[in-house]
Image (cartoon, rainbow, N blue to C red):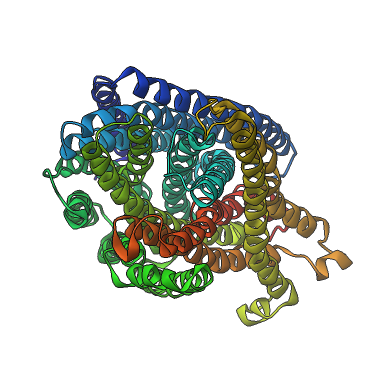
Amino acid sequence: MMDMTTAVALGVAASIVGLIFALWQRSYVLAQDAGTQRMREIAEAIERGAGAFLQREYRAVAILVAIVTVALVALSSVPGSGMSIMTAVAFVIGALASGLAGYIGMYIAVRANVRTAQAASQSLNRGLRVAFASGTVMSTMVVSLALLGISLLFIFFVNQLGDAAQAASALAGFGFGGTSIAIFARVGGGIYTKAADVGADLVGKTEAGIPEDDPRNPATIADNVGDNVGDVAGMGSDLFESYASSIIAAISLATTAGIFIDDGLLAAQIFPLLVAAAGLIISILASFLVRTEEGADQEQLLGSIRRGIYSASALIGIVVVALGSFLPFGDKATGVIIATLSGLVGGVLIGYFTEYFTADTYGPTQALSNSAEGGAGIVVIRGLALGMMSTLAPVIIVVVVTLLATSQAGLYGVAVAAVGMLSTLGITLATDAYGPVADNAGGIAEMSDLPETVRDRTDALDSLGNTTAATGKGFAIGSAAMTALALTAAFITALTAGGSTALGAAASPAELLLSPQFVTGLFIGGLLPFVFSALTMVAVGDAAQQIVEEVRRQFRELGIMEGKGQPDYERCVAISTDSAIRQMLLPGIIAVGVPVGMALLAVLGKGNTLGEFIAPISLVGVLLGSLVCAFMLAVMMANAGGAWDNAKKYIEAGNLGGKGSDAHKAAVVGDTVGDPFKDTSGPSLNILLKLLAIVSLVIAPLIGSAFPG
């Protein structure tokens, strides 16, 4: 039988291998030729803009991290609170790890873009390899730092607290720390990238009639900066939290759900760590399978990505079966294996159906492109309908996975299903982080006047990146839903542990589910994703309007179009940065404040009139209501936005009249509407539902202590 120390050592060893691999890939990317002087100047401008934004964002987030840390320390010092100061320690480490992963990922992305453009001047495969290598730096840093932090903190907390259940509770702070970075990285980065993108498109493409990434457009540098801060740093922080929280939820449920005893309990605790460690090593190996041939079409390029992901999924499936059979789960071994594999298969299927609804090689997006001949209004209507219809498959997949997992291993099955879904994150995230690098490479090629053959290759890589980004967002949303469900299960289990009456010891399940406190909690939870999305959409609109006005001013006053003056790129970068930093705070505060406020009201309302309206069961309703609404709204937004984007690209490839046609102008409008859908509001909802759940799990000991048995 493997003991906990050995399991943790394997997790640490895999993490170290991952960090070494990330550093090796970083060296490989930086060793590539950075191209001409003009290419380097453009890349340096993007690099400066991205660095300036991230520094300002992290300064703002550091204030929140400090406030939350002080609050956690204060709560842990209150006698009988049930909180441990170890939660504050884990919170700080989780925030630092998530921030570091995002910073390193973006650091390499803004240096890989120009090298990808130069590599594409040699061959399509070299361009793909350089861009994908930069994506693997991001992905392996995310997975390695998360696994390393959880492994070391868990064994440390067990030794310090002497109890695995308390250690698991304190470990939730690590996920909370990661989420605190993710909420602002996703929201702030999303506002930045889409404000710049929408502003650049509305004036550049629609009004001035100049190509995308035309160097005369003052917003084009800000647009390229936004790709990195939103889709690299933001996505990395998002999936860091999903990955960490799924493992934490599994460990927590292993210790509190009461379905494992003796050796089976230890097996259940170390199983998610071992699966994660194996997944990291397998993802590294599978990344070498991603390569292509010169002249490859989109289907062949997609095939190269699929080869890596499907190979990793197949290998980790074999490892899951081996681990489940080796560890002493007893009669629950088969159930744990099936639950984990259901999540693994579910993640692959969600990715496939996302690709089906968003890639221009399939019917839905081609039909959306055809509708552009009827005008912009028809494009918007059809895009919304496509997004709504695309929720069908992911919801059914999550339902089937949840039912299968719980039937085989109870609530613990939900958590290990999420672990299984995220086990190949080392390569899945790489395919997503690759996209912004390829997009930037195309912009640099355009602004540097590289030969048309180079632009053709970067366009092919960019189109592939659009599809992998859409697939990655679908995977991120699906994994977020499973992770939030696992965290909610861990929260409910924590509230009932030790005989606590927080959920009403004397009430029957029917009475609890029909109680006004629970039902109103559902409504409040269902409302939050819509308010959150409205705030982020308005933020993008306001910021984009400022960009539009600035670009128009420069065109009018500087004589850019007549060749009399040069665009002021820095001004647009500054506008996007200021708007994003200012407007990201309110959505983040709401996401943290709602569960804390509900918990405080429930505790204060115990035994008095307030308790008739707000109770711990109300917070459970908030978590479930937000989970259902946020999941479907996020899928709809992400897929509609991805389809609008690729419908535009399909027309730009020469179909339906090509660039400059009426169909193309209509498709640009659809893409403009879809930009904040797919890159701001939709992805941000992942963080909302996970943040609500992880904050609730962190404060569960406080609630439970207020309702002793």
Is 107 left or right of 489, judged from the image as shown? left
- Residue 369: name its quadrant: bottom left
Location of residue 320 in the rendering, given as x and y in whole percent from the top left corner: 23, 54
Task: Report the quarter where the C terminus lies.
Answer: bottom right
Q: Nearer the viewer, residue 285 or 2?
A: 285
Going by the picture, which residue comes out furthest to the left?
293
Is 500 left or right of 449, judged from the image as shown? right
Task: Report the quarter where the N terminus lies.
Answer: top left
- Is residue 535 visible to the viewer in this orientation of the structure? yes
Going by the picture, which residue comes out furthest to the top?
37
Location of residue 176 in the rendering, given as x and y in whole percent from the top left corner: 56, 43
Q: Measured along the vertical axis of the image, is residue 295 above or below residue 481?
A: above
Residue at image position (62%, 61%) is: 529
Is 160 left or right of 610, judged from the image as shown? left
Q: Nearer the viewer, residue 121 or 515?
A: 121
Q: Nearer the viewer, residue 500 or 397?
A: 397
Residue at image position (42%, 65%) is: 663
Residue at image position (43%, 33%) is: 149
- Residue 84: name its quadrant: top right
Tell me how many marks there are.
0
Is 31 left or right of 52, judged from the image as shown? left
Residue at image position (69%, 38%) is: 582
Location of residue 701 in the rendering, given as x and y in whole percent from the top left corner: 64, 49
- Is residue 405 visible to the viewer in this orientation of the structure? no
- Residue 513: name its quadrant: bottom right
Q: Measured along the vertical axis of the image, is residue 482 above or below residue 395?
A: above
Location of residue 373 in the rendering, given as x and y in whole percent from the top left corner: 42, 71
